[in-house]
Image (cartoon, helix red, strand yellow):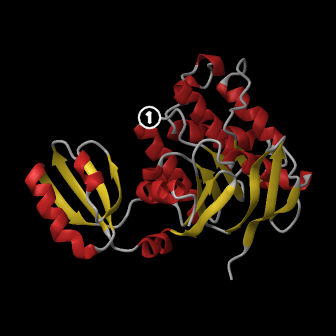
Amino acid sequence: MAETVLELRDLIKVYGDRTVVDGISLTLSKGEIVGMLGPNGAGKTTTIRMIMNIIAPDSGSVLILGQPFCEELKNRLGYLPEERGLYRKMTVMDALRFFGRLKGLERAEIDKRAESWLDRFALTEHKRKRIEELSKGMAQKVQIIVTILHKPELLILDEPFSGLDPVNIELVRDLILEMKRSGTSILFSTHLMDFAEKLVDRVIMIDRGSKVLDETLMQVRQDFGDSLVSISYNGDASFVAELPYVNSFRDYGNTMEIELADMHHKDELLDALRTRLDLTRFAVSEPSLNHIFFSRVSKGGL
């Protein structure tokens, strides 16, 4: 069996009369990438903050590398918070040296690693600038370097793609996959389903403080079945909502994912679409993570 790097058992967090996290349990194995998905206010960030011992659970437990959170673990963890934590008056290089020293690295090793990462993130020419002089995207890249500079065994990323353009999102995606291959275990939250779909080994969906899904991406798609049709079209497709054999659909403007009650209705659907739309594509497809997310969360779970 794979080594368990992170284990949450029945975490509960209550603020006033609101249960923000309601009995969440999960495990993360060595070299595994788990995506934690959910709408705003679902409890993702609160769960991550309990993992990092920033806030304490009202009940339940967190085990990291087989033990409760302690000072000795800090140098083995990397944490990218949703609210970024760089000192704005520091230069980029000073920030990397400061946080590298906090993680127990020597100055020469920090500089060696920092120069390599700055070059990879196209930040070398900005290394003497203060953090406050950087764009949001540049500051985010510095924060990511800070998070991984010490080569953590467990990486916790809360919205790692925030503020990044598509090119740098791909760069961070490649970095996450590279760290996975080196044995790092990664838990991250994101709203960007398309990128989560390309990264994760397992999907955890949280809605209103409760876990509503915890499966591999392959299992999720198998459970969802083969009743999904993807189309590309021009015209007004609002009538799809009224078709009695359509369970649900996601309309993205000129493309749509349609979940049928039964795939036997496929030809009937095709006839209806051809009659009323300029149809340029019609194909049976695997459900996207975006479609699964909206279907499951909107139904309040599985």
Q: Is residue 279 left or right of residue 80?
A: left
**22 vs 54, nearest the viewer:** 22
- Kindly identify the amino acid type of the residue bearing the numbered disc 1: Asp
Q: Residues within 10 Å of mark 1 (few under 14, many from 20)?
A: few
Q: Is residue 133 left or right of residue 154?
A: left
Residue 222 in view in this figure = yes
**Residue ID for mark 1:** 165
Numbered disc 1: secondary structure? loop
The quarter of the picture where the C terminus appears is: bottom right
Give the quarter of the image for residue 132. Answer: top right
Q: Residue at x 89, y 61 (%)?
A: 68
Image coords of residue 57 (percent x, y): 86, 52
Q: Residue at x 53, y 51 (%)?
A: 175
**123 vs 19, nearest the viewer:** 19
Give the quarter of the image for residue 263. Answer: bottom left
Q: Residue at x 25, y 53 (%)?
A: 240
**45 vs 230, nearest the viewer:** 230
Q: Residue furthest bottom?
A: 1
Figure check: 255 above or below 30: above
Q: Residue at x 78, y 55 (%)?
A: 76
Q: Is residue 27 left or right of residue 260?
A: right
Callout count: 1
**137 vs 216, nearest the viewer:** 216
Image coords of residue 255 (percent x, y): 25, 49
Give the quarter of the image for residue 178. Answer: bottom right
The quarter of the picture where the N terminus appears is: bottom right
Image coords of residue 13 (percent x, y): 81, 50
Residue 130 in view in this figure = no
